[in-house]
Amino acid sequence: MENQSNITKTSQSGKKKTIKERLRQFFYQAKHKKMTEKQKKTLLLAIKIITVVVFACVYLLLFAQGLYKESDSEGIHWKRIAIPTLIFILPSILLFVKIKIPEKINILLSVLFSLFVMKENFIMLQMSQGYQYKNLPLQIQDLNMLIIFMIFIVIYALFNSFKASIIGLNIITVIFGLTNYFLSQFRGTGFLAVDILNIETAANVAQGYEYTLDFYTYLLLLTSFALCLLAVKLGRNTITRKWWRLIPIILAICVVCRCNETFLETDEFDKLLKIKYFKPQETFDKNGMYASFAKSIKDLIVDPPEGYSVAKVKEIAQTYTAKKEKNKNEKAPNIIMIMNEAFTDFDSFSDLNISEDCMPYFHSLKENTMKGQMFVSIFGGGTAATEFEALTSNSMGFIPNGITAYSTYINKPMPSLATTLRAQNYGGMLAMHPFKGNGYKRNKVYPLLGFERFITQDDFAADTERVGRFISDNADIDRIITEYEQYRKKNDNPFFLFNVTIQNHSPFLSENVKDRVQLKYPLNIPEADQYVDLMKYSDEALKKLIEYFKNIDEPTLVVFFGDHQPKLENDFYAQIKKKSRLDEKYEELEKRNTQFIIWANYDIEEQEDMSISSNYLSSLILDTAGLQKNGYDKFLSEFRKKVPVITKYGYIGENGKFYEVENKKSPYYEWINKYNMIEYNNIFDVKNRVKEMFEVK
């Protein structure tokens, strides 16, 4: 029996070895083109079957996501079933049909099909995003088609194949379309060149969203897949052999150079293709997606301000660094600076129809308190822009459109509020963000801004309290208090901590958020409903922090502000706009205001209804704390009297009028240009940075 068992095992082992060897031999032959005709046919059939299965999965999204309906309330829309079904069935059948096309006809078909695909890509891309294509001026269409042709001919030059060019172009268009669609859904703005630089941050927050297509974006995906299958049915369509390949290569180089000159080198189309970064979707609709994206690449380039020189910056520096200031307080206060994710007090500038006040404690703070509107350069996302302005005193008004300065420009030490405080014997120097540390490169940026420690979600216990998907503001505040107490046991110097919360990050459709406050609008606005509940949690956390420091016998400032307004339903914002109490002069900065509060546990001058922008926050904190300022913040204290609010989209002068940053006819242009020169020297001319402007004596 034992011998029989051994024989059986040996037989099975031999069989396994034979199968393994056969597979190895099969792939070896495939790799070295030594397969038999039968093996080739088997492999090709398997590839076709897998391709059609994947295509079927794409097709079935039509039913899985209910895309065959006009809306959730309506029944079946038969055209939305018939068209995708035909697009799926015909190429799938043709894939298994053997078609032999004569060489000359094949070449003609390849050229005609390529022309069709290029035009179809432009039309489908525009249509899939809800943008126009029929009524675009011919010049705009030509500019978009120039880019599409560049992509096509470059791929052809590389692979010497119409098939590769058609498939490659379709893949690029689908990626472009889907990326733009989901970015528009999640943050309210479309896909621009700068977003490529922030891909790591986008990946960090991508997991919390639901990826549901609309019908036309789905149609772009399905149609592109179908065109790729049809391209495969064309014969071997290489029309340039041997040294004749130089022709498409030279043509590709010429087209690339032409695109470079058209979109990057010259100013010929700058005015025509000007991007409305406030609402880039309007630009996509007006100028086409490919041309707008190409223009956004040029906008990343930074030129020196008019009249810029290091000598000029030194001249400005002499005005603001000649005298050394003295600290106004006997003891420097602790500074707890909290940027609260998506914090917005809608009641402060509109009449919110709500069951009860969702932030009663915030509203109750009046004694030893400064508060008001703080205007920012972002809406619905881009937290690091406000963070950059608040910590460095730089303005996004001089930064290329769409750029995140953290991710792009801070690669060497940069002066900030942290460096100014450290020069005045502050300790702690602690940055905290209870989420992933690599978002916006914070793990690399904070040390360059002068912070000594960075606490992330990895430093919190696994069972830390969460509200929604993220660590709660309550747990966040508990950690701030713990860090302060641990520091105070070992050090008598004033304490500085900068904190970016995470609780209120979108999306606002989580299960573990208690429904304690209700909006009273007759609208379907579930995200806005949950958002006001989250504000209730944030208000309670703020109360815990301030009540704690009320009982601490040493001077302390608590600075609390929002980074941007949340991306909520349009119907909700329509109600906010209808009841808005903001002055008309802020009309151009709609949705670009959050609120700030500076509270002290000692006597400070009380102010309400202030209006500032986030670039002034550092100088305001230093003034309130009675601390020394560097020349930059001294300049900004004076500049704020002339220009109380400045953002990416423009500024408000002391005369109450709105101006675009580039407006040379503005009565404040000389001041604006000075600010621009100082900032340029600080960020872009690092080798020649005028140190005396940015250091405390």
Image (tube, rainbow, N blue to C red):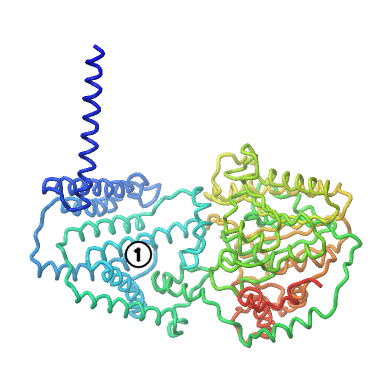
Q: Position of residue 381 (x, y in %)?
A: 56, 59
Mark 1 = which residue?
Answer: 125
Q: Nearer the viewer, residue 439 or 510?
A: 439
Q: Is residue 618 above or below residue 96?
A: below
Assess disc 1: are there few (<14), some (14-19) or many (≥20) residues with their C-alpha within 10 Å of its C-alpha: many
Give SS at disc 1.
Answer: helix
- Picture quarter containing residue 18? top left
Q: Position of residue 211 (x, y in %)?
A: 43, 50
User: Horizontal placement of 424 versus 206: left or right?
Assistant: right
Q: Position of residue 131 (x, y in %)?
A: 39, 67
Q: Residue at x 40, y 82 (%)?
A: 261
Q: Position of residue 202 (x, y in %)?
A: 51, 56
- Picture quarter containing residue 379? bottom right
- In the image, what residue type sits under mark 1? Leu
Q: Nearer the viewer, residue 484 or 561?
A: 484
Quadrant occupied by the N terminus: top left
User: Horizontal placement of 346 versus 225: left or right?
Assistant: right
Number of numbered discs overlaid on the protein picture: 1
Determine the residue located farthest toward the right in the rendered image.
330
